[in-house]
Image (cartoon, rainbow, N blue to C red):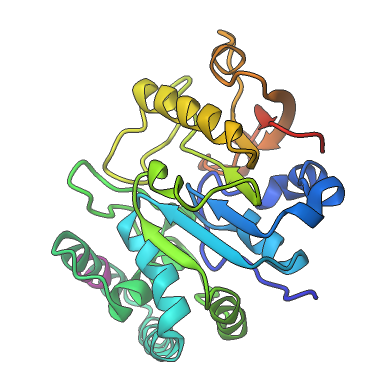
């Protein structure tokens, strides 16, 4: 049954533009009778999660990311949707009626105070959604201290939230497990009945943007993830992974036994549309699509 769920955040590296390609490689057509669970361990904006939920019925969902503010937003949508929508209406009215730059920066400072104090609640989630839809280019970027530092965007009438979409997401996530944790924490959930999508911060080439959190996903982390994926593959899980292409055969060397497919995607983190060029990406899978 179509639920028409859509990402509620803009997200650098999000997969909305690549969905039509990714869907070709979902395992459901050939293996759907065996798949009862879904896991996504670098969630971000959730484009693939929502596409899967729109089109397939699953018994259990596990979603995680290392960004605590992001995972708080998902938890609040699942558990306290009415209070969240109330806060968002208030923020939208405050911002749209006044059109004062100082309001944006005051709310950004409030959000950073809450995050740095690890005070994750309805207000924190509402501020994250508000800032995401009113900041420059919809970018989520933090400094080395974990503070969100993106300036205000120039929007005449920003669509800050879609109440109906948020309500639908809340219903779809009611029985899901939502965690802010290292990717290895999903190990106990994933088994031979699980479709796993893995979209980590891409391997850094030419200093590409990866500052979604204050933690570096460096070469050591890429190798640790590759070892984890290889172990998961032995469990019989259906694994689909994305990453950037490279000239050094890193993925061919470290993702043993996986099919590797080159695709093109329009990167969405450049400042100008003219510089959002087609980039080579990789899709990796351990099953016959």
Asked if residue 158 is positioned above or below residue 204 in the image, the reply reads below
Residue 203 in sight in this render: no
How far across and down, in percent of the image, does residue 138 sit?
48, 57
Asked if residue 282 is positioned above or below residue 196 in the image, the reply reads above
How far across and down, in percent of the image, does residue 24 sit?
82, 44
How far across and down, in percent of the image, does residue 171 sit?
58, 81
Q: Residue at x 22, y 53 (%)?
A: 147
Of 272 and 235, the residue lying toward us? 235
How far across and down, in percent of the image, does residue 40 sit?
54, 51
> Residue 105's quadrant in the figure?
bottom left
Secondary structure, magenta segment, majority class: helix
Of 173 and 48, the residue lying toward us? 173
**Apparent side of residue 21 relative to residue 283 in the rendered image (left or right):** right
Of 16 and 275, the residue lying toward us? 16
**Apparent side of residue 246 relative to residue 66 in the rendered image (left or right):** right
Segment tinted magenta in the rendering: 106-110
Residue 59 magenta: no
Asked if residue 69 is positioned above or below residue 209 in the image, the reply reads below
**Apparent side of residue 283 relative to residue 209 in the rendered image (left or right):** right
**Quadrant for the C terminus in the image:** top right
> Residue 180's quadrant in the figure?
bottom left
């Amino acid at each position: 049954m179509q639920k028409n769920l859509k990402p509620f955040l803009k997200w650098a590296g999000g997969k909305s533009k690549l969905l039509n390609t990714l869907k070709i490689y979902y395992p459901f057509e050939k293996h759907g009778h065996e798949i009862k669970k879904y896991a996504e361990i670098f969630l971000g904006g959730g484009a693939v999660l929502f596409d899967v939920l729109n089109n397939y019925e699953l018994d259990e969902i596990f979603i995680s990311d290392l960004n605590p503010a992001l995972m708080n937003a998902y938890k609040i949508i699942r558990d306290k949707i009415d209070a969240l929508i109330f806060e968002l209406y208030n923020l939208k009215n405050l911002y749209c009626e006044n059109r004062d730059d100082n309001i944006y920066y005051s709310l950004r400072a409030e959000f950073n105070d809450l995050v740095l104090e690890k005070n994750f609640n309805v207000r924190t989630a509402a501020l994250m959604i508000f800032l995401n839809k009113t900041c420059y280019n919809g970018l989520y970027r933090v400094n080395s201290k974990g503070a969100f530092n993106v300036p205000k965007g120039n929007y005449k009438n920003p669509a800050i939230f879609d109440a109906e979409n948020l309500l639908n997401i809340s219903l779809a996530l009611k029985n899901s497990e939502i965690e802010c944790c290292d990717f290895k924490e999903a190990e106990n959930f994933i088994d031979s009945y699980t479709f796993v999508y893995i979209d980590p911060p891409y391997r850094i080439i030419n200093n590409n943007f990866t500052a979604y959190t204050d933690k570096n996903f460096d070469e050591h982390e890429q190798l640790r993830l590759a070892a984890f994926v290889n172990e998961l593959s032995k469990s019989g899980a259906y694994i689909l992974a994305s990453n950037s292409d490279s000239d050094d055969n890193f993925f061919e060397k470290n993702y043993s036994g996986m099919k590797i497919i080159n695709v093109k995607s329009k990167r969405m983190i450049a400042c100008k549309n003219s510089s959002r060029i087609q980039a080579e990406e990789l899709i990796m899978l351990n099953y016959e699509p």
